[in-house]
Amino acid sequence: MSSVKKASSALISVFHKDGLEPIVRKFQELGITIYSTGGTEKFITDLGIDVVPVEDVTSYPSILGGRVKTLHPKVFGGILNRQDNESDVAQLAEFEIPQIDIVIVDLYPFEKTVASGASEQDIIEKIDIGGISLIRAAAKNFKDVTCVSSMEDYADFLEVISADNGKISLEDRKRFAAKSFNVSSHYDTAIFNYFNQNHDLAALKVSETSGKVLRYGENPHQKGFFFGDFDAMFSKLHGKELSYNNLLDVDAAVNLMLEFKNDAPTFAILKHNNACGLAQRDTLHQAYVDALAGDPVSAFGGVLISNKEIDKATAEEIHKLFCEVVIAPSYNAEAMEILKGKKNRIILIQNEVDMPEMQVRTCLNGMLLQEKDHKTDAIADLTNATTTKPTDQELEDLIFASKLCKHTKSNTIVLAKNKQLCASGTGQTSRVDALNQAIHKAESFNFDLKGAVMASDAFFPFPDCVEIADKAGITSVIQPGGSIKDQLSIDYCNEHKISMVMTGTRHFKH
């Protein structure tokens, strides 16, 4: 079997016709016989190019409203025969089956139909049968057949077919086969996930067809990759390529800021997936200034995110800081010119996209899957646990702190005052350690904790935390509750005129 094959015939049956014309004209020029069906056949005929209807080969019409067109032995025999197998070649002659060297076929737009909110019947009709079968057959038999399974590959294929007058190498045929199985496996995954939306079947199918190789992983000695449509979510306006660690911080920033999406101007600064600064103010400029005040040391090399357009005044302040990434829904022209002043600073516009509903991570020799934590604590969810009730200002600060606490590594304690992060204790094995860390940080940056509030991601099994908080000046506490010893903390708060509210919802983040 020769590794290079000259094509003499092609079957074309596609849903999308964009970009097809140059290929069809090249086939005409090379004398390649074209077989086709339905709308594709008409498209080729309208170009004034000869085409053989598949019905002339099978002696069978398209039936069942087009559900069955190419599913016939004379079609699949022409694709699946092994040309170095004497028996196969003899059967082609015996049953008058034409050899098919090239298959160009794409699939009904199943995912787009689902995303459009179409009816179930419309969605089911977009489950391709003939197309997926043609792709699998042609890709399987790559030793003799070239399979082009997506309009995205038309330019690549046209270049290959043009380079040597219709001759195609084994290497190229195998490369197109790999692309085709990528298309078919992704398609089947999308269909399965549609039928298993509620995860009634304990099976996990994940498929991402776009991705990029990163400079390295978490550390330089590790390989790293990102799989997903980054360009759909962000418009990158300036700066170097994002690293593995940049992407993790950007993810943390985006998820945190979703909690404040429709709120007053809010600015956050993140480092190592945790917020080191967060503030909400009447102007974005002041929100940034006060977010930076939360921890100006940790902010160095951080990821910055805003829920509003960044203006000139805010950009001028940001420009004084070395930061890796700036994210906002938009920037005015003057702000952009200022922020571009540092060539490596990554500037992103966050676009409106649907975020995944499920979270997936590797664990042991498998994977863990869970629903995203979509619960955001609100004032209506709170239960007063103490005789002293929080003031209106404290209630606002408690919700502010709770939103931040939800997006900080456990064990965590968040201290806030006047919608500004004073400090947080993050990722500690002891909640007391987390609180002491937060108090130490707040005091080191000259925050007056008198009248501040405290948020905890889980309950207090002992009254030690509320006692430490009280002595630091904290006057109100938000926590989920649920400990068999809740009353100990409640009793301490009642004795010392501290208000405590319970949410009934734990927000661990491991």
Image (cartoon, grey):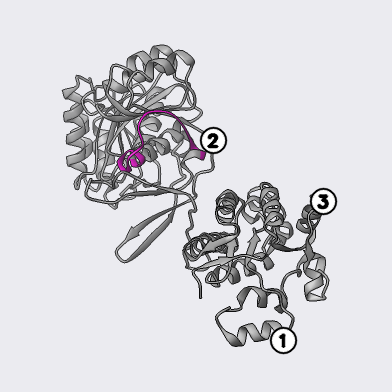
Q: Residue at the spot x=79%, y=60% of the render?
A: 38
Please identify the quarter of the rendering in which residue 488 is found.
top left
**In the image, is residue 22 above or below residue 180?**
above
Which residues lie in the magenta part? 232-248
Image x and y of residue 43, in percent: 78, 52
Q: Can residue 64 be seen from the camera position used here? A: yes
Q: Residue at the spot x=58%, y=48% of the render?
A: 155
| Residue denoted by label 3 | 46
Q: CA distance from mark 3 to mark 2?
A: 40 Å
User: Dot 1, how many residues are within 10 Å of its Cα: few (below 14), some (14-19), or many (20+)?
Assistant: few
Q: CA distance from mark 1 to mark 2?
A: 59 Å
User: Dot 2, how many residues are within 10 Å of its Cα: few (below 14), some (14-19), or many (20+)?
Assistant: few
| Residue denoted by label 1 | 94
Is label 3 or label 2 in front? Answer: 3
Q: Is residue 172 magenta?
A: no
Is label 1 or label 3 in front? Answer: 1
| Element type at mark 2 | loop
- Nearer to us in this view, 278 or 136: 136
User: Dot 3, how many residues are within 10 Å of its Cα: few (below 14), some (14-19), or many (20+)?
Assistant: few
| Residue denoted by label 2 | 352
User: Of label 3 and label 2, which has the lower sequence position?
Assistant: 3
The amino acid type, in three-letter code, at marker 3 is Asp
Q: Is residue 82 left or right of residue 472?
A: right
Q: Is residue 238 magenta?
A: yes
Q: Which mark is residue 298?
A: none
User: Of label 1 and label 3, which has the lower sequence position?
Assistant: 3
